[in-house]
Amino acid sequence: MAPAPHLRVARPTDNLEALLRFYEQGLGLTVLYRFEDHDGFDGVMLGQPNAPYHFEFTMKRGHAVGRAPTADNLLVFYLPDIERWQASVQRLKDAGFDPVPSFNPYWDRAGVTFEDPDGYRIVLQNAAWAR
């Protein structure tokens, strides 16, 4: 059986430093790589070493990208261990980010939603992925 592919979620931003505070300090991800002026783009990749996914945020000088198109653009993290989930929620609060009501009330039943500086949202779901 072939190994699972590595997933990169990439999106532009207008403010790399604000996103770094959210994803690194708040969510607890690690900066895996950072670059400047790569064909006019600056960027950062965040994740956990050896995890099968990471996030890339890029910024092109002189190009505005704006905010998320809807309040239902989500990244969902399933954290079934209650202590790890509580610590993750608290880490975001300690970094200065307050929970927001989820657009879809389903996510508020066993999770907490936070909005990043660009208006995109993450859900910390206290459940296991069971499908």
Image (cartoon, grey):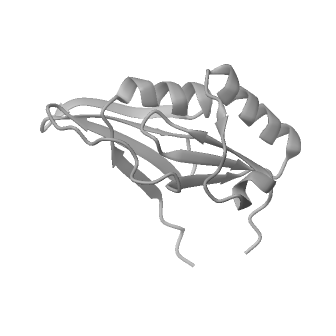
Left or right for 100, reference 32? right
Report which quarter residue 16 is drawn in. Answer: top left
Report which quarter residue 130 is drawn in. Answer: bottom right
Q: Position of residue 129 (x, y in %)?
A: 74, 65
Q: Position of residue 120 (x, y in %)?
A: 48, 45
Q: Residue at 64% of width from left, 50% of height from top?
A: 102
State whether residue 52 appears in this view.
no
Q: Is residue 14 above or below residue 3?
A: above
Depth check, front residue: 101 or 88: 101
Left or right for 5, reference 127? left
Depth check, front residue: 3 or 118: 118
Q: Position of residue 38 (x, y in %)?
A: 17, 36
Q: Residue at 61% of width from left, 34% of height from top?
A: 27
Q: Residue at 12% of width from left, 39% of height from top?
A: 39
Q: Is residue 87 above or below residue 112?
A: above
Left or right for 108, reference 8? right
Q: Considering the image in quadrants, where does the N terminus appear? A: bottom right
